[in-house]
């Protein structure tokens, strides 16, 4: 790697406030159209792979809260294992570049079944089959995708806001929160230095475990994926309860951990998770809502002090949009410390170049 902060990944992370502002303006009409499509659905299948699959999981939680029968499935799984699509289903296909094998296969199946479809993809994508296409970010130079993920969450949340406004109720106030997201991102980026000590810890330990609940299960998995893609380290994202049901047993003192939660149901269990990690001797980053009155475990427990990154207050259903940003920074800074190239998917390594050339995505 070159000088600090020279990667395309770092630049993409810092483009996100402007990308979100652009989506709020540019995709307003398309998201209203997408809400019309969703309104008539028997069931909504949200599908993608990797980072796009994580966006599908986050959106499943939001759409189910709006009364939609929504289900997130990987593109491979949905294309091979069903269920069989029906004409009154809607498929939401998420793809950064719009060119992947199984994402396109799902769209073909939807078209063959007479089901309606919505596409979510980057600018200049070749995606063309869906009835409505929501465009997110410019195509990223880094293979460790960041702004296309948060752009996807924004576009789908805008569609959710339009659904909520049609039905009224308690979630019809989502839009003002979304309009403040670019400012929330700028606030987080101004405090990026808070993540640096944890990046040092991760570069030393070489292992990371992350825990979240509800929509932030996907945030934990996405944080793990960014570290794998950028720093080539072992990382795993857990549902918070599952970490306590066996995930801890693989850890050792000095491992690095991140616990992600907004205000809401996860807070009480997060206290147990942090206590367990401290007793283990892990180095811990808490990523939490600044509105959450979190009760820190007792100071006399063994293990290092807990570091905390506060993100601006957001409803739990939208919290994944802000909670992921400190984890993107963690991945980026860890890659810088280790001297790995976070932009290439190891294509600059001849062995991995041969591996990636051996299959088609």
Image (spheres, rainbow, N blue to C red):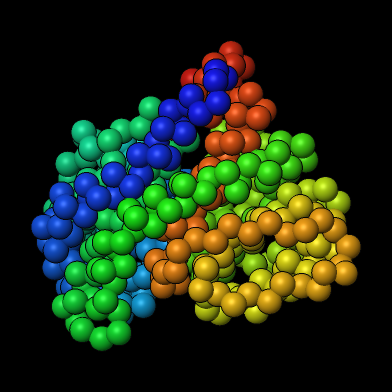
Q: Residue furthest bottom?
A: 169
The correct choice, above or below, for 346 with respect to 119 in the image is: above
The correct choice, above or below, for 166 with respect to 326 in the image is: below
Q: Position of residue 286 (x, y in %)?
A: 64, 60
The correct choice, above or below, for 260 with respect to 76 in the image is: below
Figure quadrant of residue 335: top right
Q: Position of residue 92 (x, y in %)?
A: 28, 57
Tell me if I can see residue 153 in this picture. Answer: no
Task: Judge by depth and name the residue closer to the eye, 272 or 242.
Answer: 272
The correct choice, above or below, for 241 with respect to 100 in the image is: below
Identified at 27% across, 35% down, the residue is 138
Image quadrant holding the N terminus, namely top right
Q: Is residue 298 left or right of residue 150?
A: right
Figure quadrant of residue 220: bottom right
Task: Judge by depth and name the residue closer to the eye, 254 or 92.
Answer: 254
Identified at 25% across, 50% down, the residue is 21
Tell me if I can see residue 233 in this picture. Answer: yes
Image quadrant holding the C terminus, namely top left
Q: Position of residue 344 (x, y in %)?
A: 49, 24
Identified at 52% across, 78% down, the residue is 264
Task: Judge by depth and name the residue closer to the eye, 45 or 207.
Answer: 207
Task: Judge by depth and name the residue closer to the eye, 111 or 1.
Answer: 1
Circle count: 0
Q: Position of residue 182 (x, y in %)?
A: 33, 53
């Amino acid at each position: 790697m070159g000088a600090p902060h020279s990667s395309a990944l770092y630049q993409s992370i810092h483009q996100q406030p402007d990308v979100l502002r652009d989506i709020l303006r540019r995709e307003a009409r398309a998201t209203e159209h997408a809400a019309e499509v969703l309104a008539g659905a028997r069931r909504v299948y949200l599908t993608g792979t990797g980072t796009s699959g994580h966006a599908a999981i986050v959106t499943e939680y939001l759409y189910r809260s709006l009364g939609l029968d929504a289900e997130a499935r990987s593109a491979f799984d949905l294309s091979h294992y069903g269920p069989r699509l029906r004409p009154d289903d809607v498929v939401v296909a998420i793809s950064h570049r719009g060119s992947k094998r199984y994402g396109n296969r799902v769209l073909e199946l939807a078209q063959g079944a007479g089901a309606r479809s919505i596409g979510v993809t980057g600018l200049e994508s070749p995606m063309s089959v869906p009835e409505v296409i929501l465009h997110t970010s410019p195509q990223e130079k880094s293979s460790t995708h960041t702004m296309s993920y948060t752009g996807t969450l924004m576009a789908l949340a805008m569609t959710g806001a339009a659904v909520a406004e049609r039905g009224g109720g308690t979630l019809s106030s989502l839009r003002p929160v979304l309009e403040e997201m670019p400012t929330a991102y700028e606030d987080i980026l101004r405090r990026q230095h808070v993540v640096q000590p944890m990046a040092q810890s991760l570069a030393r330990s070489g292992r990371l475990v992350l825990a979240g609940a509800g929509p932030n299960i996907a945030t934990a998995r996405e944080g793990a994926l960014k570290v794998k893609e950028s720093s080539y380290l072992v990382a795993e994202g857990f549902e918070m309860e599952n970490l306590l049901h066996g995930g801890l047993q693989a850890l050792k003192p000095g491992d690095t951990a991140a616990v992600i939660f907004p205000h809401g149901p996860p807070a009480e269990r997060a206290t147990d998770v942090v206590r367990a990690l401290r007793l283990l001797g892990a180095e811990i980053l808490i990523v939490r809502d600044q509105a959450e009155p979190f009760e820190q475990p007792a100071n006399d427990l063994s293990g290092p002090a807990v570091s905390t990154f506060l993100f601006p207050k957001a409803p739990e259903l939208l919290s994944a949009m802000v909670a992921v940003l400190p984890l993107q920074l963690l991945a980026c800074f860890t890659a810088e410390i280790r001297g790995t190239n976070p932009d290439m998917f190891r294509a600059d390594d001849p062995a991995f170049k041969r591996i990636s050339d051996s299959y088609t995505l």
